[in-house]
Image (spheres, helix red, strand yellow):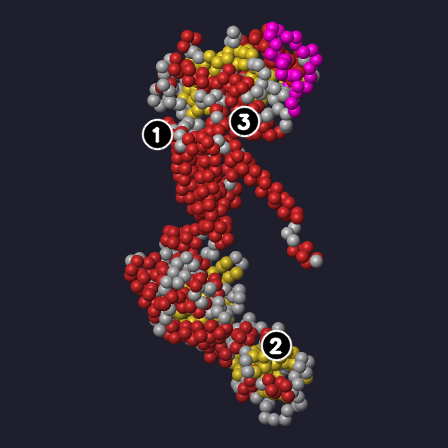
Amino acid sequence: MSLYLDCTVTRGDFTLSIAALIEPGTVVAILGPNGAGKSTLVRAIAGLHPIDAGSISINGRVVDDGGATLASAQRRSVGVVFQDYALFPHLSVLDNVAFGPRARGAGRSASSAKALETLRLLGVADLASRKPGEISGGQAQRVALARALATSPDVLLLDEPLAALDVETKEIVRAELQTQLESFAGCVVLITHDPLDALLLADRVIVLENGIVSQDGTPAELSQRPLTDYVATLMGVTLLRGEAAGGTLTLAAGGVLNIVDHDLAGPALAVVRPESVTLHLTRPEGSARNVWQGNVISLQPSHDRIRVLVDGEPSVVAAITPEAAADMRLARGTGVWLSLKSLDLQTFPAGGAGHVGIGARGVRG
Amino acid sequence: MNGRRAAAPPWFLIGPGVIAVAFLVVPLIALLLQAPWESFASIISTPSAMDALRLSLVTSLIATAIAAVIGIPLAWLLAREILPGTRLIRALVIVPLLLPPVVSGVALLAAFGRRGSVGGFLFDTFGIQLPFTTTGVILAETFVAMPFLIITLEGAFRSFDRRFEDAAVTLGASPWTVFRRITIPLVGPSIIAGAALCWARALGEFGATITFAGNFPGVTQTMPLAVYTALESDRDIAIALSILLLAVSVAVLVALRGNYMRGAARS
Amino acid sequence: MSVSRVLLAWSLATAITVTPLVGAGAAGAAPGRPAAPQQVSGTVTVSAASSLTDVFPVIAAAFMKKYPGTNVKFNFGGSPALVEQINAGAPVDVLATASEPTMWKAVNAGRVNAPFPFAKNSMAIAMPPGNPAGITGLSDLSRPGVLVAVCAVAVPCGAATRDVLKLNSVVVKPVTLELDVRDVLGRVMADEVDAGIVYVTDVKAAGGKVTSVTIPPASNATTTYPIATVIGAPNAEAARAFVMYVRFTTSVQGILRAYGFARPW
């Protein structure tokens, strides 16, 4: 039970290109901003929109080759949890879940039994006789998952499964979803714009930007080595790009940083974690080998810390405690000194990521 | 003071509104006032009156059923813009709505009369004759009334959330199952509203019917034709029949009202 | 066709309120031959049976020639509908119906002055050109599969049709009962039906557009056309002049003859 994608889909003047092999038993998140092509991908995998070139295979069987071979959505073993769930409003929860088995040829009572079993598995069997309009958002999410699972699909496609929920419910449902997905044997494709969903639920994250894959890796790889401004911003880190040579990185946007890796040469990327940047009101005297000056652009409260955007060479984000911010009387325009240990600076070759923007969007934007 | 005055309903809406109500209601009241109530029961229970009523109900219901069976699919096709030249087709199929009914009757004769382009073939090949038959009445009523159903349903299909259909397809449903179990139930209220409009139009059909199907008691003389014929001989009968027709249509629309209103609110 | 008649009836019935006119009613009632009015002018509105559609405009032209300054306007329709309109107060000056019973309805309602017969008509069978059903006489109309259009009994041509069928002991099941003889003729001309029973004058008016079978006078039915001035006519003087013109002018009878009408006396 694998899903193989290598396809191009055109919708109007937008083109989506993606190649990925998704192994059974894994959860792959497709992460991207609005307009990245996520919903086009959902429709292509589900069979609601034909691809223009390449192919999509499920379990080794080609379901769409951009030409003569095209299995309709009806004939694909893809269970879809739609954004906002799209539960049939005129059918009871039980009939919603029984719809799939029944449409695939099971008898009325067999379908109902299968539906009830799936609902029980997801802990919502008591809602069986309710109408979708009479259940909460979290319950609807579980019913939608049950409906998708009731057909025992090879591929489970979750389109923004948590976007319709309020913040509190989202955390609970996300935790539930995590255990539910673990027990699913097929491929799971999770479409989301929320990095938390991707990091917490997925084994692997494919980042989609402007119709192309900009990064493909584990959540850890993404946070340690973001390849684009978008990923870096999502991960809360600053991405710097420059030319490495002999233990220094000369940044394209201005400034020079000392780095640990003396062998690194040529185009390179550096990731600055906000926690590793220290702010000072006067020039610090210490072990940190990177010290430079800047001006505070903005202060953003974030959970237990404050993210301070500092304009300088380079511009970075620093994370400090609210107390520190108060003691230092930080405000927009305050002149500060920044320090960063070379050991806290992760560097790696820029590779082929030629489209990567210069500087961190979180700072400049 | 000013606030209270601003809260009063605007006169420029109330005035015309009251005139509109009066204009629409006064003739109906006048009809009731002129009714021959002493002989009313005996007039409407005559075999000819019952024939006309039965014929009206049967033909208008069959016309509505036909309009539903072929009009709903067309409305769907138009809403999805699947057919080439959708805009032109849409314009063409609502023409009977704007056409004077008598012109519709002449057009039907041109097509289905025994010397008509289609009717000639039917007559010469199968000996089938549509004018002057009850089938002809149904044809005329369907022609005139179906556009009401089509435009109502097209709007409903247009505003229909297609994700429900997408969801059903991914669950393995065939297009027919999707249409039958998802699309149709979800636009149900609009179907009832459209069918009610269509039926009311068919029930009141006069011009196309008398032109295309003629006027013969028990075969093609529906209630409106019976009223018109009675006007030539006995005004009292005409008024009594009119009131009967009015009562039947009001009764059916009141019975449907709950669904109708919900349909209007939902779509 | 029929709908336009309804609309016309409606507009006539609602358009104008008729002002009562004193003394005009006595005009035609006097015995003998009263003097024709000398000075008349204005519009004369004549409601006439639809079988008069062709002949009345010719008579009107002659009338307008004799009385310059007058203008005759027509409202043709089924006789009962015309009576109904006048009884409902339509602003009409002259009424000419296709039968005496229909005229009596207006007389009894007190809406017209004493009527005078001025023409007579009888029935004929009209068929589409080529006579596709091979009709040769009344008895052919009862053959199964023959589509026959006739007038409803409520209108004069229908009453005459009923009489002629009765006289000949023929039972016909028509496919449609028209309320206007011209609608029967129309269906025959359009080849919608195989035959229609119409007035002999209609056959004549249709020219070559229909073929016909005549019915022998002995077994034919006739209907008499009366004409009367309307009580409270908007233009009572001209109304009286028109009625007298139709009634007493020799050339009028000549015109009527030319269109196939017979003398009423």
Q: Do the residues under discs 2 and 1 have CB atoms within 8 angstroms?
A: no
Residue A246 image position (x, y, % from top left):
57, 86
Q: Give the Cα distance between marks 2 and 3.
A: 82 Å
Q: Quadrant of the N terminus of chain B?
A: bottom right
Q: Label 2: which residue?
A: A363
Which residue corresponds to the image point at 36% horizontal and 60% vertical from the top-left? A95
Mark number for residue B126? Answer: 1
Mark number for residue A333? Answer: none
Q: Chain of mark 3?
A: C
Q: Magenta region's main secondary structure?
A: loop
Q: Residues within 10 Å of mark 2 (few under 14, many from 20)?
A: many
Q: Give the Cα distance between marks 2 and 1.
A: 83 Å
Could you tell me the amino acid type at mark 1?
Answer: Phe
Q: Nearer the viewer, residue A322 or C226?
A: C226
Above or below, comparing residue B72 to residue A80 in the picture? above
Which residue corresponds to the image point at 35% horizontal and 23% vertical from the top-left? C145
The magenta segment is C19-45
Which residue corresponds to the image point at 50% horizontal and 27% vertical from the top-left? B235
Q: Do the residues under discs 3 and 1 have CB atoms within 8 angstroms?
A: no
